[in-house]
Image: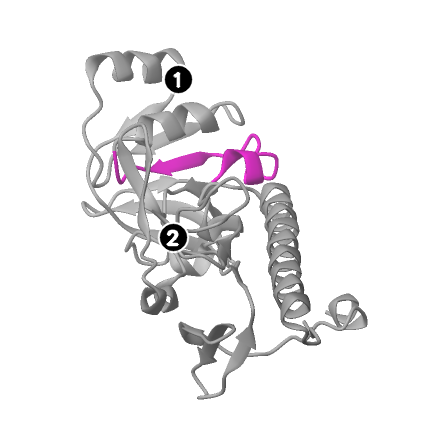
Amino acid sequence: REEVRSYGGRIEEGTVTSAERDATGFTVRPADGSAVHGRRLLVTTGLVDELPEVAGLAELWGRDVLHCPYCHGWEARDLAIGILGTGPLGVHQALMWRQWSESVTLFLHTGPEPGDEEYEQLAARGIAVVDGEVSALEQTDGRLSGVRLAAGTVVPCRALAVAPRLAARAGFLATLGLEPVGQEIAGTVIGTYIPGGPTGETAVPGVWVAGNVATPTEHVIGSVAAGNHAAAAINADLMAEDTRRAVAARRAGDAFRP
């Protein structure tokens, strides 16, 4: 934050509830009723992880309840890892996490029954499959210790992989006519995002998106790069606008001020 301020940037605390076009750009309005103006709008609001409704799961989210083997695999290596099945990608998740541990269990929960070929793949990799819905997660000293089934059985588990719905945090853009669309992987909708072009330009001229609000599965380094590309595009757009206005002012014999 200090680095941003050192370059003349401002950081405002608050939650934006709406955005609208004005005479020279855009006005965003936080919940406190104030207004902030900008000639262009770059949206980097990320996403919300909508978690499965299982007792005790939210409290362990980001610690022992995980979602990405590329982000958390090393920390969970060699542990007893469970996979909470909530959709057709459960088997895929289990096979990916098997790369990090020999003890992987797929809890079918509300997900579909694997097909014959999928069962063969799971068996070949030594992945256990447990039928029945999961009712709660068990903790010992604040850490995950087991997965409780609705039938009452507790299966020992030290890490649990889930597939949250990745919902774009972009409701305030509706006033500009931008609505999230579904993000699919292998024919399954895993979340929503605001579509953008190669540099993040949206269907609304003057509005750019970058990061997880535009690409739900992107990692930090990719999101930072997207912000960099968007910033360069916005600068080029502002330069072109200032040049057009300067030429118009020169022809009219007026002074131009950007």
Quickly name the residue at label 1: 126
Identify the residue shown where x is 29% and y is 54%.
54
For residue 27, which numbered disc appears in the image? none
Identify the residue shown where x is 22% and y is 36%.
111
First of labels 1, 2 by sequence position: 1
- Pinpoint residue 202: horizontal percent, then vertical percent: 43, 51
What stretch of residues is rendered in magenta? 68-87
Identify the residue shown where x is 45% and y is 35%.
81
Find the residue positioned furthest to the right: 6
- Pinpoint residue 41: horizontal percent, then vertical percent: 52, 64
* Colouring mode (rainbow / by chain / secondary structure / one colour): one colour
Tell me the amino acid under the disc marked 2.
Answer: Glu
Say what secondary structure mark 2 lies in.
Answer: strand
The reply to whether the magenta stretch includes residue 117 is: no
Q: Quadrant of residue 59?
A: bottom left
Quickly name the residue at label 2: 138
C-alpha gap between disc 1 and disc 2: 24 Å
Say what secondary structure mark 1 lies in.
Answer: loop
- Pinpoint residue 199: horizontal percent, then vertical percent: 55, 44
Badge 1 density bin: few <14, some 14–19, many ≥20, Cα 10 Å: some
Front one among 243 and 229: 243
Identify the residue shown where x is 27% and y is 34%.
188
Find the residue positioned furthest to the bottom: 33
Front one among 175 and 154: 175
Is residue 18 something one can see in this rendering?
yes
* Count of numbered tags: 2
Tell me the amino acid under the disc marked 1.
Answer: Gly
Query: Looking at the picture, does residue 253 appear above or below residue 209?
Result: below
Secondary structure that dominates the magenta span = loop
The reply to whether the magenta stretch includes residue 80 is: yes
- Judge depth for marks 1 and 2 and give the one in front: 1
